[in-house]
Each structure stands twice: as structure tokens, then as C-alpha cells.
Image (cartoon, rainbow, N blue to C red):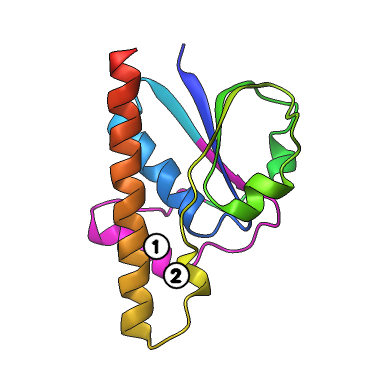
Amino acid sequence: MKTKVLFLCTRNTARSQMAEAFLRKYAGDRFEAYSAGLEPDEIHPCTRQVMQEVGLNLSGQRSKDVEEYMGKKHFGYLITVCTNAEEKCPSVFPGVGQRLHWPFEDPASFVGPDKDKLDKFREVRDQIDQQIKAWLAEQDNE
């Protein structure tokens, strides 16, 4: 049975979606990846674009409210990927084993020309990619 991992963010439009896709890519045989938001919104178009650039199509993913899962599924891990979600998520989350916090900058809040905005999304995407790989390496060593 695969361990379920929930990536939680404020809006579930960028960081948590990226983390879900990367975990599925690298360890879909060992982990079941989910993502959700405290205030879900549509997945940001730049998120879809920068993930497509690394060969990950998010067409099957959608933004979800954390209420969809709270108390309904057991997650081995709840990983918050933004400070806002970490602060606002209930300290006791029913059905969660371990809770981790990986704070990433919100690329959607970046203000600037479209090219610079895309660069910010790529930067955060690459940070999440590396964090997922490092975490999986730790899991292998336990």
C-alpha cells in the first residue's frame, strides 16, 4: 500500500501542484501524491507552462479545497509549501501522520514583465524539484 502525501498551499495554483506532479513522477510507485489549498483557485497558466517545459502535463490536475480530504483520507505526510498555509492550517489535522513545512516563494505573487514572471515560476519549480528529490533520498535512507 502506498503512503499518501498531501501538499498544502494557500490557493493550490502553483507550488503544491508542482510538488504533486514531481512526487508522482519520481515516486508514483511508492507514494500517492495529492495537493489542496485553503482557498483554492484555478491552476495558474504559468504553472502549467513551466511544468510542460520539463515534460509534466498537468491536464489531469485541478485545484482542490483541503476540505475535500480533511478527515476523509489518511495521509502519511502533510507538507505545507507556503508559510501562509503553515500558519493557517489546523495544528491538529485528522488523519495525518507526519507534518512537514517546506516554504517556497509564491511565484504567482511576483510582479513584473511576463518573461520575468515565467523565470520566477521556473526558479520555484526547480527548487521544488530539488526538494522532492532530496526528501525521497532521505526516505530511502530511513
Horizontal relation, residue 114 to residue 62: left or right:
left
Q: Is residue 48 above or below residue 135?
A: below
Q: Is residue 124 above or below residue 100?
A: below
Asked if the stretch drawn in magenta spans residue 6, the answer is: no
To which quarter of the image does residue 135 belong?
Answer: top left
Instruction: Give neighbour class at mark 1: few <14, some 14-19, many 20+ (Cα, 10 Å).
Output: many
Mark 2–mark 1 CB contact (< 8 Å): yes
Residue farthest bottom in this picture: 113
Mark 1 lies on a secondary structure that is helix
For the point 48% across and 19% down, the residue is 3
For the point 54% across and 59% down, the residue is 13
In magenta, the rendered stretch is: 34-61
The circle drawn on residue 139 is none
Mark 2 = which residue?
Answer: 45
Q: In front here: 113 or 46?
A: 113
Mark 1 = which residue?
Answer: 48
Residue 25 seen by the camera: no
For the point 40% across and 69% down, the residue is 46
Asked if the stretch drawn in magenta spans residue 53, the answer is: yes
Q: Amino acid at mark 1?
A: Arg
Q: Amino acid at mark 2?
A: Pro
Horizontal relation, residue 27 to residue 39: left or right:
left
Query: Image quadrant for the C terminus?
Result: top left
- Provide residue 101's location: percent of width, then percent of height: 53, 40
To which quarter of the image does residue 84 belong?
Answer: bottom right
To which quarter of the image does residue 23 belong?
Answer: top left
